[in-house]
Structures are given as C-alpha cells and as structure tokens.
C-alpha cells in the first residue's frame, strides 16, 4: 500500500527546497528490504527482515527496547554493514561503495539530537549544509527553520535551548537536504507531553507534505496516529500492515452490549442470532463475537428490545495498536519460556 | 563522489567556532605559548656574554626546544579530543550520517588543529627572535641566527604539528575516553620530540641539508599517517563500540 502523494502543503508550509519532496521514481519504492540480517558476533540484532516502504508513506517501525529498530535504521543509513540480505534505499543498492550516495539522499534524525551546544542554531545548520554541499544555504536554512517553527531562534546558542527545541533543531537539520527518505529514530524519546505533541504536529505536517518517513518508536499511540502502515519488530519482523489490518489479523470482531440488568436467559436471546458466533457475559453486560458488526448490531438491538431488556449501549470493540503489540510481544515471551 | 573541500571546510569552520567558545581551548592556546616564550627568553637573557661556545649553544638549544614544544603539544590535545570527544557528546553520529567520507572528516579535523597551531607557533617564534635581537647580548643573538636553529624551527614547526595531530586523531579514533586519548597522544609525540631535542642541543650536529632531508622524511611520514589514520577510522566501531 503506497498512499498517493499529497499535492497541497499543510498550513501554508513549503518544502525546504522549491521542488516537491515527495516525488520518487514513479512505481518504485523508497525502501526495499529483503532478508536483511545484522549480527554482532553471536548476538543477533535483527534477523531476516523484509519489507517495502512507498514514496510518500509514513512507515512505523515498532518494537520493545533491544528489538533491533535503531540497528535497522543505522544499517539502512549505511553506518553499519549488514551481515546478509539486500536492500535498496532511495533507489540505490545498499553496498559499502554506495554509502556517500545513499547518505546524500536520505536523512536520519537520531534519538539524541547531537547538536553542537556552543554553536548557534544557524551555525549548526550551516555546518550540515556544507556537509551536504547544498546551494542557497541561507534560503534552505530559513525554510527548514520555518518548517519546524524556529525561524526566530536562529541566533540562539543550542546549549540554551530546551530539550524539545533541540529536537526541533535536529529535525530542521534532517530536512536541509530534502531527503528522499527521512528516518526518525525515537523522535519523542525523553520529551515531556507538550514537547512530544509539538513533534507529533511537525511529523503530521511532513506527512501531509508527502515526505517519506521511517519512524521508529515504542510509543504506540504515536505510530497509530501518524503512520500509514506499521511493522512490529522483535529481532524478527512479527507483523506488518495498516493498524486496522493488524487488529483484524489478531482479534476477532466483536460488539460490546451494555444493559441495565442482566438477561434472564441470555443464550436464548443472543445465541441464535444470525452473525453472532459466540458470546460471553462480562461485568457491564455481554461481549459478542460477530462476523460483521454493522449488520449484526441492529439485529442484536431488536432481539434485546424483544426480550424486554433496557439497552444502555451497543458498540463495536476497538482493539488498539497497543493490544496488537502486547499480544505479539506476550507471544514472544511465552515462546521463549517454552 | 570525489573528495570534497566543501565538506572539509564545513568541519574545519565548525571546529574553529567551537574552539573559540571553549574557555579551556582558548586558555590552553593562550597560556601555553606565553609560557613557551617567557621561559626561553629567560634562558637567553640569562646567558652570559663571556660563556664559552658550548655553553652558549646549550642555552640557545634549550630555548629553541621550548619553541618546538608548541607545535608538538598544542595540537595533540585538540586532536585527541576530535573523534572521541564528539562521540562522548553524541555529535559524531549526525555527522557520519551525512555523505562525508572519512578522509574528508579527518582532514577537516586536522586542519582545524593545524592552522591555529601554526599561526601561534610562528608568532611566538617571531616574538622570541625580535626580543632576542633587541634585548639579548649581541653574541647570544648572533648564536641564535647562526647554524641551523632558525631553519630547523621553520621547517619542523608544521611537520611536528602534523605528526602531533595525526597521532592525536589516531588515538582519538580508537579510544573510548577523552582523558586517556589526550594522555596517549602527548606520549605519542615524545619520540619525535626526543630526536629534535638531540638536534637542538647539538648532540646530533645538523647541517642544513640534513635538516631538509629529515624534514622531507617527516613530511612523508605525516602524509602516510593520514592514510593510516583513515584506514583506522571505523564507522561501525565508532557508532556501536564494537569491532566489525
């Protein structure tokens, strides 16, 4: 699934360069990863990982600490050599000799901003503009700072900025070269809720601009809110898909029914209804396993009314991405115990 | 992608800006040269006009040795910080994920230490020569200008700085701690400095042609050191702390 690139700029924001950021080679993927493995001696960082990310897509890479997320990013960013497998990054084959070419087309924002604290925001960005050999340095820096709402802080020494503002400077730095793929490694790690919300807003605006983003996180609400698709990694890739697809893969669909008083014979009311595959009594009412909630819910309502029940609510159960994640990680823990 | 001087410049400019705002670096770059110009001047002014030639040469030789300590020690501490310091600060990874090549990164770092060292060393030597000419006894001033003292200073100042820098960066690229790197890099300059001490003190008599020949050898060693240090620069080990 590759979303269609957006053609409108969010909130009047403009790309760092005049050219649209989101356009990659048509029909190609921004990232193609096939059976990639990285080992450090005996220790396996990640194993046999395969996935594709389309241009303009925001791809969430989830997993617990030590799952291999950051190592995957560093490997795709040519900082680490893979042990086996292959990948295409921004249309370039992942090989040691292609390192500089790949790094010129991507950006990575590491978990720690890594700014030169004695230098100003402008001086930090000037340094990186030089490292990317960019032209129109002043213009690019101004646009990058505007994109992260820091245009008025260019002269501030980075050491004087709060953690959230430093993270924004790091994001501006990552946008300088208009990357074909932007890797964000735990961008809200260690930030307070207000600063996290600001970073989420910035990522959302980049998403609307069609920037291809590879977002590693263990904040599930972050992935659910921002990503078109997510992959769950725990050394091996456990699942990949849209959050709602993952929910459907792991959990049957169900209806939560709340009634004022328990039914006298619930099996007689609920058991024989078409579309109801099973039911169980819970503290606040009943949970019904159903094949299609939209068709079954009205039938359930009619049956309950017919049985004289006072209905408080009938809602479709919504499993969060967190439920999906915990289900998978719990499976892994169980498997290791066995 | 070929070797880029734009990227080298970006690293050097950043380093120089960082030095300027670091009190420790500014302090080292000010106090050390001051010390190394005052002590040799005391040596020169203290020398007696009627002293025999051996004694005079010893005084002048010791003074010149002080001058050579500047290019030997001044850049080595800066170079020793260059890689491991960035690693400790967490600023190395963002740089390494740009298209920069390790050779460019290293030359940028080396130039940032080399240029101020060279300026300071020559300015201090100029002050020493001027003060000696103006205030020292004529026989002593003439002893300074005689022989190969001035030639050795002019030739060996940049080469010694180059050696100190590459030793410092090499140690820095393989070290996990800034303090250890700084100590080891100073130790790494000692063998070369010992040779120069023997020359300055006339234990080894140096003719002009021998001085030029030695300088050529040292230049070759400096250039070779750049390639060796580049080969030692392992992105993966620097990022993860593990050997590839």
Image (cartoon, coloured by chain):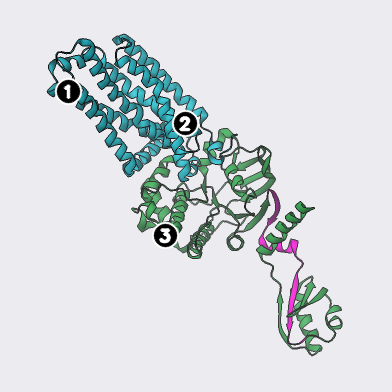
Residue placed most toward the observer, A299 or A186: A186
Residue B85, horizontal then vertical, whole percent: 44, 40
Per the model, the C-alpha gap separating discs 1 and 3 is 63 Å
Of all chains, the one bearing label 2 is B
| Label 1 close to label 3 by CB (< 8 Å) | no
Identify the colour of chain A in the image. Answer: green
Residue placed most toward the observer, A321 or A138: A321
Identified at 78% across, 81% down, the residue is A300
State whether residue A230 is above or below residue A177.
below
- Residue, disc 3: A149
The answer to whether residue B171 is left or right of residue B137 is right
Q: Mark 1 or 3, which is nearer the eye?
A: 1
- Residue, disc 2: B171
Residue A308, horizontal then vertical, whole percent: 79, 90
Per the model, the C-alpha gap separating discs 2 and 3 is 41 Å
User: Can the viewer see residue A266?
Assistant: yes
Identified at 32% across, 14% down, the residue is B199
User: Can the viewer see residue B166?
Assistant: no
Region rendered in magenta: A235-261
Discs 1 and 3 lie in a common subunit: no
- Residue, disc 1: B45
Examine the structure image and report whether residue A246 is included in the region drawn in magenta: yes
Identify the colour of chain B in the image. Answer: cyan
State whether residue A96 is above or below residue A229.
above
- Label 3 SS: loop
Examine the structure image and report whether residue B107 is included in the region drawn in magenta: no
Of all chains, the one bearing label 1 is B
């Amino acid at each position: 699934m590759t979303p269609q690139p957006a053609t409108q700029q969010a909130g009047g924001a403009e790309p760092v360069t005049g050219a649209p950021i989101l356009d990659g080679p048509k029909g190609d993927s921004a990232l193609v990863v096939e059976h990639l493995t990285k080992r450090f001696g005996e220790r396996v960082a990640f194993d046999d990982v395969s996935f594709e990310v389309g241009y303009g897509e925001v791809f969430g890479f989830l997993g617990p600490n030590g799952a291999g997320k950051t190592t995957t990013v560093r490997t795709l960013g040519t900082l680490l050599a893979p042990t086996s497998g292959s990948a295409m990054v921004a249309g370039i084959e992942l090989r040691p000799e292609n390192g500089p070419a790949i790094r010129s087309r991507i950006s990575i924002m590491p978990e720690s901003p890594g700014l030169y604290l004695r230098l100003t925001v402008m001086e930090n960005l000037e340094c990186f503009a030089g490292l990317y050999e960019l032209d129109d340095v002043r213009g690019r820096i101004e646009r990058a700072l505007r994109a992260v709402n820091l245009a008025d802080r260019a002269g501030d020494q980075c050491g004087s900025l709060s953690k959230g503002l430093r993270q924004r400077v790091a994001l501006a730095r990552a946008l300088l070269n208009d990357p074909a793929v932007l890797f964000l490694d735990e961008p809200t790690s260690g930030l307070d809720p207000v600063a996290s919300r600001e970073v989420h807003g910035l990522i959302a605006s980049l998403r609307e601009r069609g920037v291809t983003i590879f977002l590693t996180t263990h904040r599930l609400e972050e992935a659910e809110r921002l990503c078109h698709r997510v992959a769950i990694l725990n050394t091996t890739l456990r699942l990949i898909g849209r959050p709602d697809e993952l929910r459907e893969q792991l959990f049957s669909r169900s209806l939560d029914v709340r009634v004022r008083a328990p039914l006298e014979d619930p099996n007689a009311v609920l058991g024989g209804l078409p579309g109801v595959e099973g039911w169980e009594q819970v503290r606040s009412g009943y949970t019904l396993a159903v094949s299609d909630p939209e068709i079954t819910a009205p039938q359930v309502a009619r049956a309950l009314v017919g049985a004289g029940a006072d209905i408080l609510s009938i809602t479709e159960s919504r499993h969060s991405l967190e439920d999906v994640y915990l289900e998978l990680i719990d499976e892994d823990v169980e498997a290791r115990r066995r | 992608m070929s070797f880029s001087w734009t990227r080298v410049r970006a690293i050097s400019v950043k380093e120089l800006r960082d030095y300027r705002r670091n009190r420790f670096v500014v302090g080292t770059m000010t106090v050390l040269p001051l010390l190394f110009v005052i002590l040799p001047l005391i040596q020169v002014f203290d020398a007696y006009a009627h002293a025999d030639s051996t004694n005079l040469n010893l005084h002048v030789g010791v003074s010149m040795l002080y001058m050579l300590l500047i290019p030997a020690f001044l850049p080595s501490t800066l170079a020793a910080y260059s890689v491991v310091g960035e690693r400790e600060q967490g600023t190395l990874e963002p740089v390494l994920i740009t298209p920069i090549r390790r050779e460019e990164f290293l030359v940028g770092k080396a130039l940032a230490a080399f240029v101020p060292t060279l300026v300071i060393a020559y300015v201090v030597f100029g002050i020493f020569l001027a003060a000696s000419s103006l205030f020292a006894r004529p026989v002593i001033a003439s002893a300074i200008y005689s022989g190969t003292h001035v030639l050795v200073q002019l030739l060996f100042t940049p080469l010694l700085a180059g050696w100190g820098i590459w030793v410092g960066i090499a140690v820095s690229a393989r070290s996990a701690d800034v303090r250890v790197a700084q100590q080891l890099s100073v130790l790494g300059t000692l063998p070369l400095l010992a040779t120069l001490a023997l020359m300055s003190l006339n234990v080894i008599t140096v003719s002009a042609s021998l001085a030029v020949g030695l300088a050529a050898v040292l230049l070759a060693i400096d250039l070779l050191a750049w390639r060796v240090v580049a080969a030692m620069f392992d992105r993966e080990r620097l990022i993860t702390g593990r050997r590839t």
